[in-house]
Amino acid sequence: MAPASDCLRLDRLSSPELQDLCITSRLGGGKLIACLPIGSVEQHGPLLPLGTDTRIAEELASGLLTSQAFRQNNWHGLLLPSYAYTNADTGLEFQGTLSVEHNALRGAFASILASILRLDIDALLLVNGHGPNDPWLGELAFRANQEQFRSQHQIKPVIMASVPQVMIKAYEGFSYPKGRHADWMELALAYALLGPELLADREEAFAQQAAVDAPASFPIVGIPLKSRSSSGILGLGWPKDRDIAELSGQVRDAVVPALQQAVTAAIQQALGYRDEQRDDLPA
């Protein structure tokens, strides 16, 4: 995966530089795709950082924007500053978790989404790393697309990619049980993307993580994480006797290509449909 520093980043461009980028991307027949990583600030067991969801989304977004598929389709990527403050109410009993109430979150994000769509872009890709964000993000993306297609003016499709949903599918390729939060797969993916720095001076925390074997599902939704987890983990902490680099590489190879294929197909379909609708408009 390419580090985020290899991407064109909105927060490192001046306003005139961004305007030039928008113009340049079209001179060669290209499309400018903005990408917003979305995560959370939430406890992730004894080992993983509070920003795990956000950092995974950032690294995966960076890899998407610098992927061969983007180059082949003549798409130019613009990485937006990550949106990390979302709802993490179930983890509030753990130190460090920060959460935004759902109604306030929807309103704030809808406003930011509207301002992003004012940019001179061809599409907006939302890369979500925090599972509880999926429902309200899908709702707001749906609404934004409806409003744009109804207005038939400067349509910029909003496309959503859910990292947790790709991970759920990836579990099928392994013999270990499916978890729900801060389990072996999330640890493996974080290690694959962030490298050995993840474990630096955290040997004791890794041992605690590896010892966990907690249930992953419950009959009642909304139970606070502290009451249904072991050390803040839902699922198996780490498979015994598995090398972290080896298993992390396998998880990366299961998750990253699947995410890239899904995103590439979604962007192609969305831009193709948009252009068909545009061609059908009366002159």
Image (cartoon, rainbow, N blue to C red):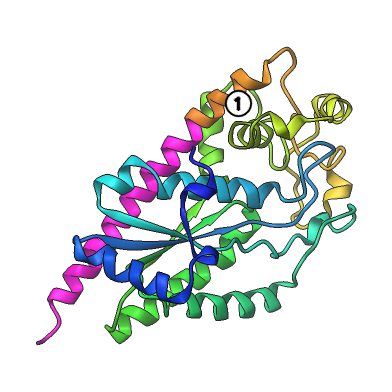
What main secondary structure does the magenta stretch of the protein show?
helix
37 sits left or right of 218 in the view: left
Residue that lies at the very extreme toward the left in this rendered image: 283
Q: Amino acid at mark 1?
A: Ser
Instruction: Give the position of the C terminus as an image quadrant.
Output: bottom left
**How many residues crowd mark 1 within 10 Å: few (<14), some (14–19), many (20+)?**
many
Numbered circles on residues, count: 1
Task: Please tell me whether residue 189 belongs to the stretch shown in magenta.
Answer: no
The residue drawn where x is 41% and y is 50% is 65
- Front-most of residues 225 and 260: 260
Q: Is residue 24 above or below residue 218?
A: below
**Location of residue 147 by image quarter:** bottom left
81 sits left or right of 91 in the view: left
**Location of residue 207 by image quarter:** top right
* Label 1 sits on residue: 248
Q: Is residue 37 above or below residue 189?
A: below
- Front-most of residues 114 and 198: 198
Task: Please tell me whether residue 270 belongs to the stretch shown in magenta.
Answer: yes
Q: Under tag 1, what secondary structure?
A: helix
- Front-most of residues 60 and 265: 60
The residue drawn where x is 81% and y is 27% is 206
- Front-most of residues 99 and 80: 80
Q: Which segment did they paint magenta? A: 254-283
Residue 252 position in % (x across, y down): 53, 31
